[in-house]
Amino acid sequence: MSDLLQLFLYLALFPLVHSYTFYGSSYVTYENLSNNSPLQYFEFKFRTFQANAFLMQHELYKTDSAGVTTAYTMYVKLTKGRLNLVTMFGAEKDTFTFGKGLNHDKWHNIQLLNDIETGNLTVSIGNRITWKSLDSGSNNSVYAILQQHNGTLNSTVYFGGLEARTTLDIHPLIGCLEVLSFNPTNKTNGNIPDTEHNVTKGCVNKCDADDSCLNGGACLNRYVTTSCDCFGTGNEGTHCEKSGLTTVTLNGQERLTYEIYGDNERSHRPVNMLSIDFKTSRSGLLLHIVGPGQVNNQVTASVILSKLHVTLAFGGPDGHKELVLGENLDNDRWHTMTILHKGRSVNVSLDGQVQHMSLSADHHHLHLEPTLYLGGMDNFDSVTSFHSQQNFIGCLRNIYFDHASVLTQLNGQQTLAQYFGEIIQYGCKDLPITYPMSFPTNEAMLTLSGIQGNTVEIALEFRTLRADGVIVYLDMGREGGNGYFQLIILRGHIVLQTVLLPTSRRDGDRSSVTLGKRINDGQWHRVNFSISVDENVLTLDDLRAARHHSSAVSEALSFGNELYIGYGLEQAGFIGCIRKIFLQFKAIDPFRIINSDASQGVTMENCDLTDYCHGFTACQHGSQCVSDWHEAVCDCRGTGYEGKRCHFAKYLRSCDEYYQAGERRSGVWQIDIDGSGPHAPTYVLCEMGMGGTGGVSQYGQTVIENNLPNNTVVRSSTLRDHRRVLSYRGLTADTFHHLLDGSLTCEQYFRYDCFEAPLSVGNKTWFTSTDFRRQDHLGLFVKDSCSKDNTTCNNNNQHPSICDKGLTEWKTDEGFERHKYHLPIMELAFRQYGKGRANFTLGPLKCLGSSHHTTPVQFTTEESYIKLHCWVSGDLKFGFRTTSPSAVLLFQSPSNDNKNMFQITLVNENLISFDFNLNGLARNVTFYSDRSFANGQWQQVTVERSNSEMRVSINMHRSLVDIEESGPWQGFTGPLFLGGRPSIQWQPGMIGCVRGLIYNDHHHTLLKDPAESVQNVRNGCHAVCDSNPCHNGGQCVEKWTSADCKCNNPYSYLGWNCNLDINQYAVSLLDPSSYIVLRKDPNSTFFTSNIIVSFRTYQIDALLLYAYDHLNNFIEVAVQQGEALVFRFNNGSAIVNLSLVLDDISNGQWKQVAIETSPNGAITIHVDDLSVEYPASSRSLLTEYSQIPYLDPETVKPIRTSQPPEPHLKVYIGGVPQDMAQSAPVLHGCIRGLKVGDSIIDLRRHANSSLGVYSGCTGGCDSDPCHHDGVCKEEWAGAFTCDCNGTVFRGPLCDIEAAAYFDGSTIIRYSIMSYSVHKSQSTELHERLGIAFLTKDTAEYKRLLVLIYSSKRPMTYVVIYLTSNGSIEVRSNGQNMNYTLFVPGYFADGRQHLIIYQRMKDSIRLEVDSKVYERALSRQVTTGSTHDRILVGGVDTTGEFDDFRQFTGCISNVTFTPPVMPSFTVRPLDVALGMQQALPGNSWRVKGRLSQANCSQPLPNGNNGALPKQSEVISFPPWNPGPAKVVYLNSSDVDVPENPMPVTETPNDLTTIVASVLVAVMIIAALIIAYFLWRKRIQMENRAQLPALAYMSDHVIAKSDYSISKPHTPPVMFLSNKTYYLASMEDLSDIGSSDSVFHSKMNGVALPLHDPPKSASMGTIPMIDAESQESLNPNKRHSLKTFRAAPTVETTEPDPSPTTALLAQEPEPDLPHVTEEVEMELLSSPECFLEEPDHQDITQASTRTTLTSDLQDDDRGQDSMSVDV
C-alpha cells in the first residue's frame, strides 16, 4: 500500500478537531512527532481581521551538546492578507504566495500536502487547489536526512504563534484557528497538544459576554476586545452613546484624509463599505482612493452639475465602470451615498436609489493605497476627467469606511483621520463669497456672461506681485468686431484701455484711463470701473479718474454677452488672487463658478501669494524678477537673452556665425558681441557669402557704420589743427575687441581727396584706435613714405602718396586699413597747412569670417578620433562637416568615480541627438532639420552651461535642458573624444572635418592639444567637392580623398561628372504628317534594348516611337487617351500591351520616358518619378516572314507584300506615314533625348530635312503670357491662346478687367431680348451666371450681388447675395426649383472672390474661389430658363427683396449665359462701362454713380478691420549721434576742447579774415558785459523775495521726440519737504500711455520724471544751460543743488480731482528752515529745456509755491544749477 493511501486512511479514521481562540501572545504546539514519513500533511482553518498573522510551523531539528540544529522548516503565515508558505532546508529557501483577501474575519480552510521525497507541494484554500515544486531540499536531500537519522530527529508543529526561543519575525495570531488533522503523528499521546499557551478552547465571540453598544449599535468582535459600529443609528461615540452626528463645513480650500490601514497592511479586500452624507450647492469631489502603482483599482465619487458620478475599478479587462445617479444634488439638502462591496457584488445607493454591479471571479478585490481622500486633494492628476477637478464646498457628515466613523475619529483627534486647511469648521455653516480665487498661470481665466445694454459695471478686489497682466477683457460689439475694453496692470499701474478697431468707414481709436498708484505690492486693492455711452470711470481704492469717449467710440459702443477675468488679447493674463467680484451690481459666487465650465485653471486656494523675488538676485542681463505662483522667475523679454536666469544670449556673436549656421540673408541682424557676457545685443549690417566662390570658403561679414560724413572737409585755410572723434553704431571702444578677436580679417576703407594739401601720414595726419595709441600709418601709407614720382619706393609694405606731391589739382589717395588690432579708427587728427583743401571719407568697419576656423582637422576613417582632456569650464563649441549618414561626433566619457557623461550623435542626415547623464539624471534633446546635417557643409555645434540648465545648439536650432534637479554640478572627469569614440560596436565615428573647437575657455589647435590620437587624422580639410566637379546639378558625394557624382537625373545626364546632357537638343513636329525615320542594323539588339526619350505635347493620343524589321518584329511607344504611356511589342506572334497610367501626361510639360528591360526579361516603365514593373517572362522574336503575322489588331501596320522584303530595321520617331497608321496619330509637339541601348540619337541632324520637323522647341506658353491665372493653350512655334474662364479677366491675354465701384446706391439693370429654349435646342439646359466682387462692408444686413429673373414670371429668379454675417448664399425660386445653397465663411474681407453658378438638367453646381459645391435636383428640368432681366449691385423695386441692401464695394466679370448656344453670353457690366456693345435688342441703364475700378487688388491693410501688425522685417533702430566731434589741438599735440567752428570753406582773403575776427571780438565783449549786468540784477531780486517755483513749459526732461495734434497741458514742479515731481498734467492722468517712469532718489530728494504719452506729438526741444547757453549734452551729467527751507506757503482748498490726489501725496504744512544741502546729478536730454521762471502761481496743485533758479559754475568747472528754497 502506498504512503499516500496509508495517509488518507489514517486521517479518515482518526480525525483531529482542536479549536482555539488566540489573543496575540498565544500558541499551541504538538511535539515528539514521527518524522520518517515522506508525506507531510496539515489541515486547519482560521479566521482573523489581521493582514499579517502567524498560522503554523513545522520543523525538524536535533538537540545535542552543541545545541539545537534545525534541519528543515516549513511555516505558513498571512502577509498583507495573502497566504505565505515558506520551506527552508539549510541555506536553501522556497517562498510561495496563495489567495488574497483572507483577513476579512471569515473562516478559511487550508490543506497542505508536502511530498518531501519528490519535492511536490499541494496547497488547497477552500476549493482552490495549487501545485508547486520545491527547490529547497532537492535531490531528495530532506528525505535522505530522514532516512539517515531513522526517526531520531525532533519534529514539532506550532499553531498561532511560537515559543520565545524562535528567531522568526512574526505577528502572532489574533483570531480563531481550528486544527483538523495532520501527519506526522505523535508517537505517544495520539496527537494531543503538548502546549496550549494563553488560548481559549473554541472560537469565542467576545460580544456574547461584552456587548456594550447602545442605541442599536452593532458589536464587533475583535477577540481581545470589542468595538461598536454606529452606522445607521444616528449616534456616534465609543458605544454609540452620543446623539447627533459630527458635521464639518469645507469651503473648497480644505480636505480630509483617512488612513484605512498601515502601509504594511495593504491587502486585497473582498468586502468594503463606504458611506457619506453631503450637502452642497456646487460641484466638487466627495471621495477618492486608488490602488498602488500600476494596480487599476479605484473608488471615486463626486458631484458634477447636480448629479453623482461614481467610478469603480477592480482591475481586469473591464477597466473603469462609470455610474451616474440622482438629480438636483446641488440643492443644499442632505443626501446619502453608500457603496457596499461584497465579493462579486457591488451596490451603489443614493438616497435609496440603487445601482448594481457584478464583478468577475478573477477581479473582485480592491487593492488600495492606505489614504482615502475626502472633500478634495492637493493634486488631481489621478482623478479622471469624468470627475470634478475641484475640492468639495459644503457640509459632510456620517462618513464611514467599513465600521469606522471618520469624523468621530477626527473629532477625537485620532491620527488616522487628518484635516488639511485652516481652522476646521464643525457644523454646517453658510459660506461667504469673500473667498479668494487663485489665478496661478497666465492661462487661468473666468468667463462671465449676462451683460445687457450699453453700460457695464464691474467691481472686484485683487492682489498681485506682477507688474503686468490683464484683469478684465470685454469685447466691444458682437465677437469683438468693433474693438474691446480691458482693465490691465501696466508697469505696476492700473489702466482701463479702450480700443476701437478701424473699418472701411472709420478710423481706429485708442484711449486709456490711468491711476498712478503702484498696485503690484501683494496687498489687496479694490477696483471699480464702469463703461457707458459717454465715458469710462475708473476707481482704485481712494483714487478716481474718468475719460469721455470719442464720438466714434460712442457710436460703436455695444457689448458682447461675455467678459473674461484674467485673460488678455494683447498682453499676458493676470497672475494673483481675485475676490468679491460684482458684475452689474450682482455678486459672483466663487464656489459656484469655479466648479463650472466658466472656470479654466482657476483654483480655490489660500491665495498663497509669496514674494519670491525678495532678496532674489539671480536674474541676469537686466531681466526683471517676476514672482510666479511657486517660485521666482526671470522675465527675459526685451533683454536679448533666454533661459531660467536670462543667462544665454539669443543672438549669435557675428554675421559669420549666422552664415556658418546656414543663414544667407544679407541685411540687418542682431548680434551679441560677447555672447552671454555683460554687453547688450546690438544691430549690425550683415553681408553674406563674402570672401570666396565656393560655399565652404565663403563667410559672413559684419559691417559697423560710423558717424563721419562722406567728404568731410578736414583741411582748409579757415580750419585749425583738430581731430575728429568718431562714434560707431552699437559698439564702443571697450567692446570692439570681442569682434576683432573673433574675426578672421577686418578692414576699413578710406579716401583722402586733396588740392595742394599733402596727406603726410605720421606728420600731419594720424589716427588712434580703441587703445587710443597714435598710429603713424594709414593703410599702406606710412610715415615719411615716398611720393608718387619717387623711383626709390620699392617696399611692398609702402604705397606712394600722390597727395604728398602737393599738386594744385584735385587728386585722391585711397586704400584700406587692414591691421586688425589698429581698428576701428576712433579718432583722426589733421594739422593744417594754411593753404589748400582736403576732404576725408571713412567707410564702415568690416570684419569677415572667424579666427577660430583656421585650424581644421580631417578624420578619414570611421575608427578615427582624437582624445582630449575633459570639459571642466566654459562653453563648448565646434564646427563639423561630413557626408556620413550617421556618426558619433563627440563623446564626453564618464570616469570610475564620476558617471556624468554626454554624447552628440548624428542619427541620420536630418536628425542629431544630444544625450546627457548628469548625476544619474538622463536627458535627451534631438533636432530635426530639413537642411541635411550630412551635406558636406559646415555645421556649428554649441553646448553652454549655467548653474541650472544647459543650452544645446546646432546651427539655428537650440533647446534648453533643465539640469537643476540633477543636484550640484559635478562636472566631467573622463576624457573627451572628438570625431568618434573608442568602441564603435554600436555606431561609427565621423568621416569628415572638425574645426574651431573651444572649451575650457580656450581655443584648441587640435593636433597639438590631444592627450591621445589614433591614426587617420590629419591637419586641414581637403574636400574634393569644394571644386564643384559635378555638372548639371549633380550631387557631389564627398569621400574626402575622392568624390562621386550622383547625377540629378541619371537618364538625362551621363558621364562620371554628369557633364553629358542628352536633352540638350530638341526638335519640334508641327505638321500633321511630320515624322523622322532612321535605319538601323537589322542584326542589332534594338528590340530588347533600353529606351530613353523625352517629349511634350497636349495631344491625348500621340505616337512617340515605332520600329519594325523585315520579319515584322516591332516595338511601339505611344501616349494613349491622355492618361497612359503604352509600350507595345511582339512576343512571337502575340502583341503585348504594357502601360503606365498617369493623369498629366498631356499637360504640355516635358515628360521623360525610360523603358528598361532586365536580363531576366522583366520590364520597367518610368515616366518622370512614376514607374511600374512587369515581371520577367520569356520573350521571343519572329524568325520567319509572314504577310499576316498577327491576329490581334495593330495601331501601326506596315505595308506587307506576299514576298519577304530585304533585311532592314526602320525606326520612326513622332509618327509614321499615313498609309501605315491605323490608330496612331502623329505627335504634335516636341521630342528630345532619344537613347536606345548605348546609342544616343542626335535628332537635330534630321530637323529641316524632314517635313514639318524643326530644330528647337519653342512653346508659346513657355513665357507664361496669360495674366491673372488664365490658362495658356499651346499652339507651338511661339503661338498660343489664353483661356480666361475661371478668372475675372478677359481679352487675348486675360488682362482686361471689367470692374466698377458700387457706392451703395449703384444698380445696373440689363434687359435681354426675348428668347425661348426648347428641348431640341439644348439637351443639357446649361445656365451659367458669374460674378466677382470685393468688399469690406461689415454692415449686418443682406447685400445683393446679382439677380436674374423673368419679366413674365417675376417670382422666377436666381439671386446671389452676401448674408448679414459675410457668407454667400444662392437662392432659386420658380419652375419647381426652390432651393438655397449656402457657402460658409467670411467674404467681406477686402479680397476678391469669384462666384460661378451653373444649372444643369439634374443638378446645381456652385464654384466659389475654385471650391465646388454641388446639389442634385429632386426632379429634372425639361424646359429652358426664361430669365431675361439682370440686376447688379442691388434692387430698385419693392416686394420679395425688401430686406436686401445695395452692395458697397467692387464688382467685376458679370456674365450670364442662358441655356442656348454657349456663344450667347451677356456682359452687363462691360456694356455699362462702355467696353462692349449691347447685343441687338437688349437694353440697359445705370442708377446712381458707376466708376471704373481695379478689383484684383486687396484693400489696404489700414482698413481691414484689425490693428496693423508690426512688420517682421528687421531694420536699424534710430541712431543719430550727430557728426563726429571736433577737438582742436595746440602746438604740443595736447587736446584743448573747444566749441567746434563751422566746417565751411571761405575765400582765402586775409583782409576778410581780419575783419571777421575783429567783429567777433567786439560782439563777445558786448555779450560778456550784458551777462554780468543781467546776473547782478537777478541776484538783487533773489535777495528781495522768496524763491519761486520754476514754471516749466511743456515736458521737462522728455526722453524722445513726439508729435501732438492738440494743445498740451503745461507741466508743473510740485514741491513737498521730501519729493519734487516734474511732469505734465496729462502725463499724470495717463501713466499707462507713458513710455516709462523714471524715479531717482538721492539724499532724500526724489525726482520722478514722466515721459509724454506716445500718442502725443511735439518737436525736439533742447535743454539749455541758462548761463553758458550750451545745450545740455545727453551723455553728460549736470548737477542740481537744492536746499530745504521754509518758504512762504499760500494754501488753498485741495482740489478733489484725481489729479490732485496724485500730486498731493505727502503734504507737509510745516517746512523747517534750511538744514541741509542736497546735490543731484541730472542726465540731461536734448529734447527739453528750463525756461526762465515767470513767478506765476501754480493752480493745478493744492499748494502754491514759487521757486527761482540760479545757474552758475561750481568749483569743478562743471555745469550746475542751484535752486534756493
Image (cartoon, rainbow, N blue to C red):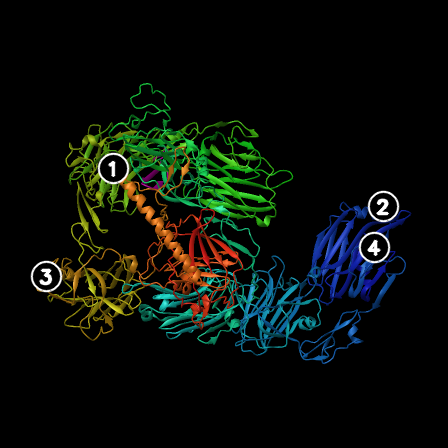
Discs 4, 3 touching: Cβ within 8 Å:
no
SS for dot 2: helix
Discs 2, 1 touching: Cβ within 8 Å:
no
SS for dot 1: helix
Task: Tell which circle, 2 or 1, labels the residue nearer the N-terminal end.
Answer: 2
1134 falls in the magenta region: no
Which kind of residue does numbered mark 2 sit on? Answer: Gln
Which kind of residue does numbered mark 4 sit on? Answer: Thr
Task: Tell which circle, 2 or 3, labels the residue nearer the N-terminal end.
Answer: 2
Q: Which residue is mark 1?
A: 1551
Residue 834 tag number: none
Residues 697 and 670: in front is 670
Q: Which residue is mark 2?
A: 148
Q: Which residues are magenta?
A: 1157-1175
Judge from the rendering whether residue 1521 lies leftward or rightward of residue 1343; answer left or right.
right
Whole-angstrom CA distance, mark 4 to mark 3, is 120 Å
Task: Tell which circle, 4 or 3, labels the residue nearer the N-terminal end.
Answer: 4
Task: Tell which circle, 1 or 3, labels the residue nearer the N-terminal end.
Answer: 3
Judge from the rendering whether residue 267 lies leftward or rightward of residue 1307; answer left or right.
right
Q: Is residue 1749 above or below residue 796?
A: below
Whole-angstrom CA distance, mark 2 to mark 3, is 129 Å
Q: Quadrant of residue 490?
A: bottom left
SS for dot 4: loop
